[in-house]
Amino acid sequence: MSIARAASVDEIVFFCQSGATFIEKERVVADTKKRVEFVVIQNEQQADQALSEIGAAQRAIHAIDGGYQIELTALKQRYAQELVDPLDAINKRFVGLYEFAQSNRGTLLSGDSKTIKLPSGELRWRFTPFSVAFKNKMNNDEAVEALKEAGLPEFVRTKEEPNKEAMLKDAESRAKAAAVPGIKIVQNEEFVAKPNEGLEDVVGDVKKLLKAVA
């Protein structure tokens, strides 16, 4: 087993179906400007060795991820503690500023102004944009029914979108959908390496892999 072969590819994509959490993207895309090396396997023994090595690499990833999560938790706790004092300082002074401004509103403001200008900044009152709230824990469905019963259908939004689940339901549905201009039904073949011990599947698109080994 060697790593003498290299392939020039448009894109190689592989991913673990339940990858380590510190890897933000499930899919890892190779740099299209580089030649990608791959291990040359000549028999079943070498294939088994490669699969075993994939499992070992996955276990290493889990170990690294475990350490990362421990350090991340400790880091969050440390900075959360450091934030206590400045956040408390902001809160106490903000409430104090409101009490002062509200108590002296008549003398600090002139005309219709709602802004108090100070050397370090401004204090002001403002209204938020209008928003809709539902009373008595009313949910969306109940709100829709209430608006319909009140004769206000203009306040009910109807959203139309393609029903992809229906298009994929069965062979007949897939054929009908595929006959519509602009719509195609896609199914890709994947190659899967599944190490033992409950580790993640490593999955690659066959079309891209064929380019890699050509």
Image (tube, rainbow, N blue to C red):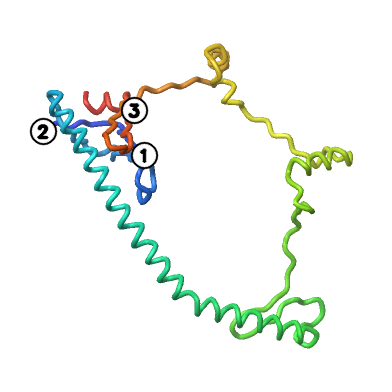
Q: Which residue is mark 3?
A: 205
Q: Position of residue 144 (x, y in %)?
A: 78, 40
Q: Position of residue 12 (x, y in %)?
A: 30, 33
Query: What residue appears at the point 10 percent right and 31 percent down from the top-left corner?
Result: 1
Eyeballing the image, is 67 above or below 38?
below
Q: Which residue is mark 2?
A: 2
Query: What residue appears at the point 56 percent right and 17 percent down from the top-left corner?
Result: 177
N-terminal of the pair, mark 3 or mark 2, is 2
Query: What residue appears at the point 73 percent right and 59 percent down from the top-left corner?
Result: 129
Q: Secondary structure at mark 2?
A: strand
Residue 13 appears in view: no
In the rendered structure, find residue 27 and report the number of the disc placed on it. Answer: 1
Mark 3 burial class by Cα count in 10 Å: few <14, some 14-19, many 20+: some
Q: Position of residue 74 (x, y in %)?
A: 37, 66
N-terminal of the pair, mark 1 or mark 2, is 2
Q: What amino acid does circle 2 point to?
A: Ser
Mark 1 burial class by Cα count in 10 Å: few <14, some 14-19, many 20+: some
Q: What amino acid does circle 1 point to?
A: Arg
CA distance separating discs 1 and 2: 25 Å
Closer to the camera in the image, 135 or 93: 135
Q: Position of residue 100 (x, y in %)?
A: 71, 86
Indicate left or right for 82 with 54 as reference.
Answer: right
Mark 2 burial class by Cα count in 10 Å: few <14, some 14-19, many 20+: few
